[in-house]
Image (cartoon, rainbow, N blue to C red):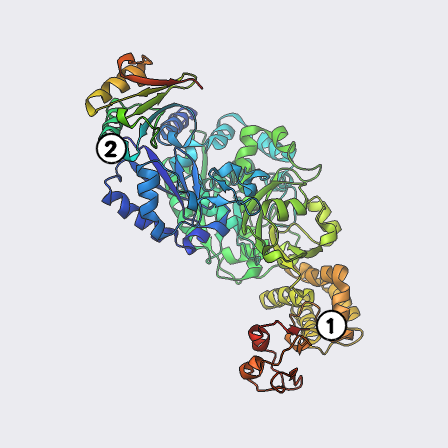
Amino acid sequence: MKTIEDLKRMREQFQAENSIRQTGGIQVIVGMGTCGIAAGAREVMTAILGEIARRNLKNVTVRQTGCIGMCEQEVLVDVVRPGEPRITYGKVTVASVPKIIGEHVVNGRIIEDLVVGKIAD
Amino acid sequence: MQYIRAHVLICAGTGCTASGSKKLEAALHEELVKKGLDKEIKIVETGCHGFCEAGPLVIIYPEGTFYVRVKEEDVPELVESHLYKGRVVERLLYKEPVTHESVPNYNELGFYKKQRRMVLGNCGHINPEIIGDYIANGGYEALAKVLTSMSSGAVVNEIKQAGLRGRGGGGFPTGMKWEFTQKATGDKKYVVCNADEGDPGAFMDRSILEGDPHRVIEGMTVCGYAIGADEGYLYVRAEYPLAIKRLTIAIAQAEELGLLGENIFNSGFNFHLKIKEGAGAFVCGEETALLASIEGKRGMPRPRPPFPAISGLWGKPTNINNVETFANIPQIINNGAAWYAAIGTEKSKGTKVFALTGRINHTGLAEVPMGITMREIIFDIGGGIPDGKNFKAVQIGGPSGGCLPKELLDLPVDYDSLVQVGAMMGSGGLVVMDETTCMVDLAKFFLAFTQSESCGKCTPCREGTMRMLEILTRITDGEGKVGDIELLEELARNIKNTALCGLGQTAPNPVLSTLRYFRQEYETHINEKRCPAGVCSALTGYKITDKCIGCGLCKKTCPAEVISGELKGRHTIDQEKCIKCGDCAAKCPLKAIIKG
């Protein structure tokens, strides 16, 4: 390392690795209640992690939540982009994960036919 | 590449390691592997959070949930519930002592609310064994800034303007010290970091070195540039193996990235760092003794002047500062002197780290702005005195400092106010005492410490502290004489005025300050042959009060068989033969046996 620019580059690189310890960014929230897990939430979660890694996305955190009562619609996955309403997708399968990540998380386009709820903040 | 969705920060400071954080980490790793989560969840070892009393501490991100006292057996639930299903494990959260409410998040804890964690900002939040974690938080930017855009004079000036004073004890202005060394003539100069933290109850330097070693390395390197030194020594006491290990790793990583070594940031500036382990002598915390020890000589102080700034290590100009002082440097360079000088009081700038120990609820490390009151530190941050006992005194500044009574709780804490009341900042150890502490016994403890650590070179310290200790021992043994207090004061004055180094000059402080604020207790020991706190065993007896119902339990328990009395009648203790073990008082079902 010989210049300030080298140091800055390194700083950015390490910040990205630790970004989940910062607040902010896009959140993807998987319903991991008993109902969700029974409907395959864990497999969906694994697929989401795989998709994020494949696309090398930064500034996205994956969280879990419990049952919100719409058990019939499980697996439920929420996407929250900063400043936008929380969008809940229902009956999410491993197959629909690339679409949710690609369309909504990356490009901000809500996939209307999968939406089962919207909560404005 | 695998996406990591959660970081589990486990405190691997000395406190949490002692309460089992290594075992916890191993158990967690095993459980994650078992559940197939080990690829998506990362375990991060961190340094000390300062909240040692509640360790082992665990923080889980992205939620930032703060768990306390996590044990191996909690691991399956933590993994299944929090890491798999995303449900907070309520029972492992910290609960505020007064409201009993769970506090899920770090920053909302009463312990942290009044703190201003700058020097400790990274401690507990980064992995001290990974240089990238430090760089991610702005590490080495101060070094880059001084090497590429500041003259050495400008650096010294910045530190002077900031008003930083030495955090090791005396509080000498750091910028002035740097200026002396910079202006000293010599072909070779040294930077030395004093990490021989030896005060009983002080552990802030250890925690900084263990939790954020690069901050100290960066501070020393900036100093090297400012004074024109190309070599530095970290003098670390051998009792700090973890600090030495982390520093060794940190130095190697900094060398690998070219942040230590030759031609740093293409500036032509070279700087090399070495670690020197101490060998267990308290006096080596004194700067001239420390330098002698690095040179391989016996660790004994020498008269000053010449000061190390003129003639230090191997006779060369040497700038010697404490760990916490160096740890303050990067933020001053990054944020500017004016920013730093706005924190604290008129003559004491910035923050100070205090180690809270003794009879206090939250044993640990607290970093507060200068000028905060002792009451805020002990009661708001420290959570007050346990077991419903009353505050009696706080010992500040280690064996060189003094004891402050409750009347001084609202004293704003800074260098000068403490000296005025007969104590000193010292390294920042705070030992809190409740009503069960005997102040004469306490003074004896500290004096016994300095007495045994006296190097023996000068007579006032070698002989004087010994005589003082003899008098104190006599008083606590119930053989105190009229005139002992005056003799103690005379000896103390003479030692203060004539001892060679700081250790001797300050050794009488614990006696003088307890005499100043708790003279009555000395007098009670001498005149009434009584220890009001019930600590000095020679002056403490057990009495059976009229609450006695004559059950005979005490009589059966007494190992010396000196309790007599009829069944259902009041019993008595033969004071002459009583060995004062206290077994009878512990056994009595009616608490009819009292000490005093």
| Residue in the image at 41% along x and 19% along y | A82
Report the amino acid beneath label 1.
Answer: His
Report which quarter residue B445 is drawn in.
bottom right
**Numbered mark located on residue A42 in the image:** 2
Of circles 1 and 2, which is in front? 2
The Cα–Cα distance between marks 1 and 2, rounded to whole angstroms, is 71 Å
Q: Chain of mark 2?
A: A
Quadrant into which the N terminus of chain B falls = top left
Whether residue B497 is visible to the viewer of this picture, yes or no, is no
In the depicted view, which residue is nearer to us: B159 or B38?
Answer: B38
Per the image, the residue denoted by label 1 is B525
Taking the image as shown, residue B501 lies to the left or right of residue B237, namely right
| Residue in the image at 59% along x and 55% along y | B386
Quadrant into which the C terminus of chain B falls = bottom right
**Numbered mark located on residue B221 in the image:** none
In the depicted view, which residue is nearer to us: B550 or A29?
Answer: B550
Q: Secondary structure at mark 1?
A: helix
Q: Is residue B269 above or below residue B245?
A: above
Label 1 environment density (alpha carbons within 10 Å; few <14, some 14–19, many ≥20) = many
- Whole-percent x, y for residue B330 in the image: 52, 35
- Whole-percent x, y for residue B92 in the image: 42, 46
Taking the image as shown, residue A69 lies to the left or right of residue B111, namely left
Q: Is residue B67 above or below residue B138?
A: below
Callouts 1 and 2 on one subunit:
no
Q: Secondary structure at mark 2?
A: helix
Report which quarter residue B551 is drawn in.
bottom right
Report the amino acid beneath label 2.
Answer: Arg
